[in-house]
């Protein structure tokens, strides 16, 4: 008798909870998708300024290697001087993929994020970031023009962030396992690769674009001009290539420390990687090399963005100005292994030919580097006769591939 | 003869109102169970019927069954579901095979003085961080230089490397204490007189084990298996670290919940349903009474 009554209470309680959940759910994310298509970004005002005293702290979401405070390498530290100069303590969280970055930003509590192009547009249209008032960032004037006001960091002439630098995704190999010279993605994609079982790839849906870049060189009749603007046929071809690659894969990576360890131990012989991974692996004594493949590569040009309701807005703007100042931008670029954003940094790098090695001023190098961007149904290459595959379908296709 | 005394003169509020006392005692756990636990499961299940805006990834609250259709018609997800159930079952079987003799030794063979020490030794790995243990196994399973490869090398075998086998080995190691302890508890409740009686009746050790010990300890084994099965079913970190390119259901949820939360919710309801079915199946074995 008591059991029946208790069960009734539990049943009523569950119904109440479900009703609560249904009603309460409508209050969390914003009502309808603000600006659901590429036409209208949410109307947010940039901070008018002026940049006053710091609030005492700044919460930063960044790629690993961008915000170093001496804990990775005691000689590599541009956070402590910032904290001393501005009084803003840096609270850092790193992420491994752009999807993580978007999810973390949606969770709130962050002031600044270093977003790659496959995150920036989602953050802008998802109403998670505010436009950046570039007049409040004095060092913005010295940034290379080729990085400013790009498709992925500005909308309708409104700047949404400060460019950080740029780099390409490289093909990296362990020289003990791979004795031939490598200059192409072929050993990572072709079915007859001698490194079957020891190939690695980046574990994110955006990697489909890398397959598309390879197809641009090997199957030109598919007509791919922008690896982020793929109609259904081109997309299917890219997925077929990735299925073929899956046979060669040993493991996928998104955590850069795992990639370093895998390359150094020889578990991975060859695959997609970043320059910072090659630098850190070599610093640990690993026998690795990396280069940009001749077919071209995907890359990134990251953008420092300010969260929509950033609590520490003054510290956020101070950080933006700090990270693209000539000295600091040179330090970051050398540590991470990418071309700096600030033109004056080239004279301040400890390696005198750094900018030449990383092609900072060499526009020809970047013509076949396709910066990470967010695929949309409206084709990014301007085609209007077909629908392109949007990022959410990239993600489901990637999940199906990884199953 | 018995005078009715006013009960206001003795006993507190809870004594005088037993139903209120019951309600007061039950409210916090019921709130936790119904609102926080069941409520969040219900919210998850609800989300599975929604969809996302293509571009911004924001939730669109229109009812649709597309997510479930996608999960059940795309064959690559069948493979993941079956593989995950396979891993969970294998881990359960191996934990039983390793845990039962160990628990038997602890409960019936080892001197009574040793029991607390042995229990402490079994429990100690649980104090170490989950990630530390899995990364340790990552080092041990390494294809060329790992401990397992080094061990099997002279026998002419390759190490298991990273993959399905690696996941099963690591999860077996992780959940073994959760199997050993319920079995140990069940065995200590077994009266020694039963074993004596069985021997007196002429049964050898194997027969005693089969006919006396096993039926008595079966509910404990099933209780342990609930832990290992459900913990393995939902695991995703182990697959990421030692799984190579092998993925489990949890990984599918992890890769899709950022861009397509309703789809991830639909996938996430599958392990819930599987575990519920498993719990209904074991309810009759009496395992849940002894938990």
Image: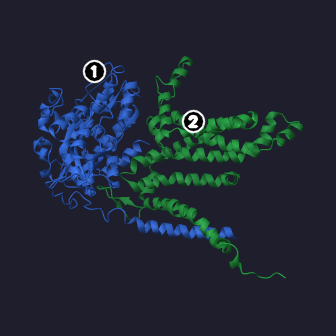
Disc number for residue A171? none
A156 sits to left or right of B257: left
| Residue at point 47%, 34% (across, down) | B135
Q: Which mark is residue B173?
A: 2
Q: Which residue is mark 1?
A: A181
Front residue (pair A177, B176): B176
Residue count near mark 2 (Cα–Cα under 10 Å), binned few <14, some 14–19, many ≥20: some
- Give the colour in which the image draws chain A: blue
Position of the N terminus of chain A by quadrant: bottom right
The quadrant the C terminus of chain A occupies is top left
Does residue A237 appear anywhere in the picture? no
How far is the residue under mark 2 from the one under mark 1?
Answer: 42 Å
- Residue B219 drawn at (x, y percent): 70, 48
Work out whether residue B250 can be spotted: yes
Chain B is which colour? Answer: green
Extreme residue toward the front, this view: B9
The quadrant where residue A333 appears: top left
Across and down, in percent, residue A255 comes to 37, 37
Circle 2 or circle 1, nearest the eye: 2
Name of the residue lying farthest toward the right:
B201
SS for callout 1: loop
Residue B11 vs residue A98: left or right?
right
What SS does tag 2 mark? helix
Residue drawn 64% across the image and 73% down it: B13
Along the line of sight, which residue is nearer the eye, B158 or A286?
Answer: A286
Name the chain letter of the residue that bears numbered label 2: B
- Work out whether B29 lies above or below A99: below
């Amino acid at each position: 008798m008591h059991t029946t009554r208790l069960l009734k209470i539990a049943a009523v309680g569950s119904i109440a909870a479900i009703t609560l959940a249904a009603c309460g759910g409508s209050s969390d994310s914003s009502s309808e998708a603000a600006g659901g298509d590429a036409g209208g970004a949410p109307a947010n005002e940039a901070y008018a300024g002026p940049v006053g005293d710091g609030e005492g702290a700044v919460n930063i979401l960044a790629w690993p290697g961008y915000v170093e405070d001496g804990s990775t390498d005691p000689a590599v530290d541009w956070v402590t001087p910032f904290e001393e100069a501005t009084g803003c303590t840096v609270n850092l969280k790193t992420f491994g993929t752009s999807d993580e970055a978007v999810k973390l930003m949606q969770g709130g509590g962050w002031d600044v994020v270093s977003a790659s192009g496959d995150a920036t547009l989602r953050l802008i249209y998802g109403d998670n970031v505010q436009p950046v008032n570039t007049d409040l960032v004095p060092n913005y004037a010295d940034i290379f023009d080729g990085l400013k006001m790009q498709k992925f960091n500005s909308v309708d002439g409104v700047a949404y962030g400060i460019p950080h630098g740029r780099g390409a995704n490289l093909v990296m190999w362990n020289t003990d396992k791979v004795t031939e010279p490598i200059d192409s993605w072929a050993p990572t994609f072709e079915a007859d690769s001698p490194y079957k079982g020891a190939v690695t790839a980046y574990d994110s849906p955006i990697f489909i674009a890398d397959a598309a870049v390879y197809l641009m060189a090997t199957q030109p009749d598919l007509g791919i001009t922008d690896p982020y603007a793929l109609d259904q046929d081109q997309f299917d071809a890219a997925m077929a290539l990735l299925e073929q690659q899956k046979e060669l894969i040993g493991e996928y990576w998104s955590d850069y420390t795992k990639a370093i360890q895998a390359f150094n131990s020889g578990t991975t012989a060859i695959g997609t990687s970043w320059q910072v991974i090659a630098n850190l692996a070599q610093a640990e004594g690993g026998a690795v090399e990396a280069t940009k493949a001749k077919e071209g590569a995907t890359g990134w040009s990251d953008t420092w963005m300010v969260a929509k309701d950033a609590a520490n807005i003054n510290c956020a703007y101070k950080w933006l100005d700090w990270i693209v100042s000539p000295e600091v931008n040179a330090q970051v670029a050398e540590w991470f292994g990418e071309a700096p954003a600030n033109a004056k940094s080239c004279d301040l790098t400890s390696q005198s030919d750094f900018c030449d090695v990383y092609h900072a001023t060499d526009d020809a190098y970047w013509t076949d580097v396709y910066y990470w961007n967010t695929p949309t149904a409206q084709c990014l290459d301007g085609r209007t006769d077909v629908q392109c595959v949007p990022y959410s379908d990239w993600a489901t296709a990637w999940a199906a591939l990884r199953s | 003869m018995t005078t009715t005394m006013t009960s206001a003169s003795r006993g507190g509020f809870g004594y005088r109102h037993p139903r209120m006392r019951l309600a007061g005692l039950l409210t916090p756990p019921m709130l936790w169970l119904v609102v926080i636990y069941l409520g969040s499961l219900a919210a998850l299940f609800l989300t599975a019927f929604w969809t996302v805006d293509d571009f911004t990834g924001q939730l669109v609250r229109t009812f649709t069954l597309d997510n479930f259709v996608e999960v059940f018609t795309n064959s690559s997800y069948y493979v993941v579901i079956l593989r995950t159930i396979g891993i969970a079952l294998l881990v359960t079987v191996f934990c039983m095979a390793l845990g039962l003799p160990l628990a038997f030794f602890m409960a019936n063979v080892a001197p009574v003085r040793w029991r607390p020490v042995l229990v402490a030794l079994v429990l100690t790995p649980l104090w170490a961080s989950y990630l530390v243990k899995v990364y340790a196994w990552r080092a041990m399973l390494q294809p060329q230089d790992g401990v397992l490869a080094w061990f099997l090398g002279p026998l002419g075998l390759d190490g298991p490397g990273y993959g399905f086998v690696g996941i099963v080995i690591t999860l077996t190691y992780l959940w073994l204490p959760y199997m050993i302890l319920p079995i140990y508890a069940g065995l200590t409740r077994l009266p020694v007189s039963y074993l004596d009686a069985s021997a007196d009746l002429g049964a050898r050790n194997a027969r005693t084990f089969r006919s006396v010990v096993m039926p008595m300890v079966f509910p404990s084994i099933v209780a342990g298996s609930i832990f290992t099965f459900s913990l393995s079913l939902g695991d995703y970190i182990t697959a990421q670290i030692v799984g190579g390119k092998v993925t489990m259901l949890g990984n599918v949820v992890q890769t899709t919940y950022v861009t397509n939360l309703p789809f991830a919710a639909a996938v996430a309801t599958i392990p819930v349903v599987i575990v519920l079915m498993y719990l209904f199946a074991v309810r009759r074995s009496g395992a849940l009474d002894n938990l």
